[in-house]
Amino acid sequence: MAVSLLAREASDLCLGKPALRSLSATATVTEALSAFKRFRETFLSVWTATDQSNAAAAAAADDCLFCIGKVCMVDVICFLCKDENLASPAQALQSPVSVLIPKIPGLVRHLEPNARLSEAFDLILEGAQNLIIPIQSSRKKLHQKPASFNSSRPNNREYCWVTQEDIIRYLLNCIGLFSPTPANPINSLNLIDDQNILAVHYDDPASAALPLISQSLISQTSVAVIDGEGKLVGEISPSTLNFCDETVAAAIATLSASDLMAYIDYGGPPEDLVQLVKDRLEEKNFRALLEFMDEDSTSSSDDEFGYGKSGRLTVRSSEAIVCYSWSSLVAVMIQALAHRLNYVWVVEQDGTLVGIVTFAAMLKVFRERLNTMP
């Protein structure tokens, strides 16, 4: 049963998914921002010339280009929040986009389209965030030259991501085969991680959350915001920040964690918080950042980018999605998938934060279960 379940080609998980937008590693951060807004993309794949000393990589990338990572708006925001970049944001945006890519090997891996799902499963368990797979239907376009590198066809091919979420959705479709495990409570399956919780106090400066935001982006989780009693009051989530514009860096540099949650919530920041940010930028003598914030608000075009007046797309609330230690595995899976998250916070009935359940932990349980199947 386990053999047949994972015998499908990993490329089957790409059916119906759009091709990736690509960007050269030599493109600037400004060009990445333009692509995010123009194409309304949340992530861009970054490509560079393949290291010819790596034969496997060269084969995967057709001896031409190789995906070295992915970038998103959160990467840009965290980059702009560095001390040296707060002083000169316009200059920082001229940096090559490659500076945004985490120096962690293996976050993005190449797979051939005929690779088995078992191989994709194991690579994800080893720590890969995204697997790059060529879309086979585009092979007939190999002779065509892309109009630009800001296209969806590096190496004259189209590619697609496979992620943790894709594999979890696949497993959910055949959840009955794993019975009774999916019906068991998450605490009985040792799924609750109470050691690696990323959290800040709601009165802490939002800037204190910056290293945690970067870490949560890599771990595909979030930063919890708690009160003095350890109760979960919200979160600063990469999935929410990813739909903000780059000027939210000014809010992170000046606001508390609780005020930042209000700033990035539905509908754009309240006018009083916008003014508070500007006043504090003046106090801190961040004149360049203040000018950058004003210039961006006047230059962004709603018609061109489909953004609101704050430069934002419609996003979800900073309210945290929670479950309980007695919630079943399948219930938590469905909850996370419904909210397009890779995690769910675990709380007590009074709201006290207990831990977090992640797709990564779920996948380990399913892999162990598969190993015991005939």
Image (tube, rainbow, N blue to C red):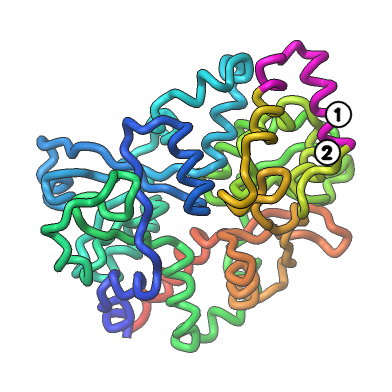
Q: CA distance from mark 2 to mark 1?
A: 10 Å
Majority secondary structure in the magenta region: helix
Q: Amino acid at mark 2?
A: Asp
Residue 78 sits in which quadrant? top right
The answer, for residue 195, to whether it is visible in the render is no
Check disc 1: other Cα within 10 Å, few if <14, some if 14-19, many if 20+.
Answer: some
Residue ID at (79%, 43%): 269
Residue annotated with mark 1? 276
In this rendering, position of residue 85 left or right of residue 148: right
Place of residue 253 in the rendered image (x, y in percent of width and height, measured from the top left): 72, 26
Q: Secondary structure at mark 2?
A: helix
* Residue 241 percent location from the top left of the image: 64, 45
Q: Looking at the picture, which amino acid does disc 1 mark?
A: Leu
- The answer to whether residue 185 is above or below residue 212 is below
Q: Is residue 189 left or right of residue 141?
A: right
Quadrant, the C terminus: bottom left
Residue positioned 88% across, 60% down in the render: 350
Helix, strand or loop under label 1: helix
Q: Which residues are magenta?
A: 272-291
- Work out which residue is located at the far bottom of the displayed protein and give it: 176
Instruction: Decide: is 65 above or below 160.
Output: above
Left or right relative to 122: residue 115: left
Q: Which residue is mark 2?
A: 259
Q: Is residue 240 or residue 271 the one in the foreground?
A: 271
Counting from the top left corner in percent of width and height, residue 309 is at 73, 46
282 falls in the magenta region: yes
Which of 286/318 is in front? 286
**Is residue 111 in view from this perspective?**
yes
Residue 222 pos. (x, y %): 64, 48
Residue that appears at 77% across and 13% down:
284
The crowding category of the residue bearing disc 2, from other C-alpha atoms within 10 Å (few below 14, some 14 to 19, many at least 20), is some
Q: Are marks 2 and 1 in contact (CB under 8 Å)?
A: yes
